[in-house]
Amino acid sequence: MLDLFFRKYAWTANLALLFVAAWLAAKTVNTLAGAAIRPEPRADVASLPTAPPRPTLPATLDVDKLFKLIGQEPPREVEADVAQAPLAPQNCDDPHAAPTKSDLRLQLVVGVIAERARQSLATILDLNTREAKVVGVGDEVGGARLLGLERVRDDADATGNGFRLVAIVCNKGTKEYLDFEGGSAFASGGEASGNLGFAPVPPPTRGGPAPGGRAPMEGVREVGQNKYEIERGVIDSTLGNLNTIATQARIVPSFKNGAANGFKLFSIQPNSLYASIGIENGDVIQRVNGYEINSPEKALELYQKLRESQRVTIELERGGQVIRKEYSISGP
């Protein structure tokens, strides 16, 4: 009975087996094809959010523990109040502003107040270069501009009636003054030098002209004993440059019996104006056109008057004797 059944339906079992085999084969092929054509997965690193940077904590040092480690005590903190320097006033254009003591390394040597204030003159010494310069109102000296000369009360005078001469200058917009003591930088330790009695003077050479002989300057002619003729052009060109005159000889005040009696000349340069007009080393010039010149102020005041003179007479002392020299100014 069973044999008959199996023989009759055996093809059904074969068909089921073929179907299962076909399904397995199709599944295997589908899996292999899908694996072959499937794209490889990749991560987009650029699109990923970046982690915030980790904060770096500052290194700290416990000073107290450090000093305990080395067996020392920490220094005490000193609170220093640094005061800001006040700004200098810009008061050069204010005629009523009081000037302050200048700290420039400049020193007033000689000053002359003219009848017209704009014509006043001053000799100012640069303490850095040791160069003396004659300046007028409005001229520049040492980075400052001369505004004028004034007489101010001398606080050091016990009577209260003393006055001293100061040069008013404009230094970077601030009105300051220079006196015969020099600036504060000079007073702190500098030493003055110059031709007016501050620097040591070499011993005079008596009885002769300046070393190297004396050749008359062009435009200067000796017409007789102690008489000379000078062209006006020589006077104008020479007096127009007082700094050049100051280098042609050394001039110091001369004193006799404790009183000033003129100015003594040393180290006269050959071919200079002094040598050409008969001035010798050691001569003491006492009077010019009858005016005594026993102070720098009188000397500069006389200089103003002589520029228009036609005749000049100089009285000088040489070897204890007074000699009179006459000069005639010719030309327009």
Image: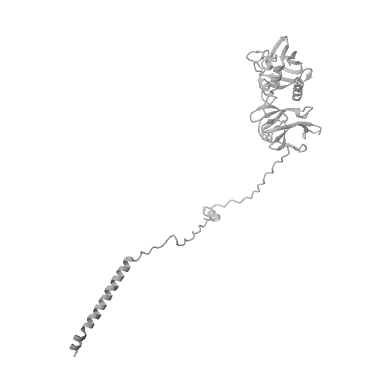
Residue 37 placed where, x, y %?
33, 66
Q: Between residues 209 and 118, which one lies in front from this camera angle?
A: 118
Quarter of the image containing the C terminus? top right
Q: Is residue 167 visible?
A: no
Which residue is drawn at the image coordinates 28% and 72% (left, top)?
28
Query: Residue 308 appears in which quarter of the rendering?
Result: top right
Can I make out residue 22 in this image?
yes
Residue 16: which quarter of the image? bottom left
Q: In the figure, 288 relative to 105: above or below?
A: above
211 relative position to 23: left or right: right
Residue at image x 72%, y 12%? 229
**Which quadrant of the rendered structure holds the N terminus?**
bottom left
* Residue nearer the viewer, 124 or 114: 114
Looking at the picture, how far across and down is residue 248, in whole percent? Answer: 66, 20
Could you say where residue 46 lies in the image, as x and y percent from the top left?
A: 44, 60
Q: Looking at the image, how many numbered discs can be counted on the residues?
A: 0
Image height check: is 69 above or below 41?
A: above
At x 30%, y 68%, the residue is 33
Q: Nearer the viewer, residue 26 or 261?
A: 26
Q: Residue at x 24, y 79 (%)?
A: 17
Q: Is residue 56 above or below residue 100?
A: below
List x then y, in percent, for residue 84.
67, 45
Name above or below for residue 195 compared with residue 52. above
Residue 176 location, quadrant: top right
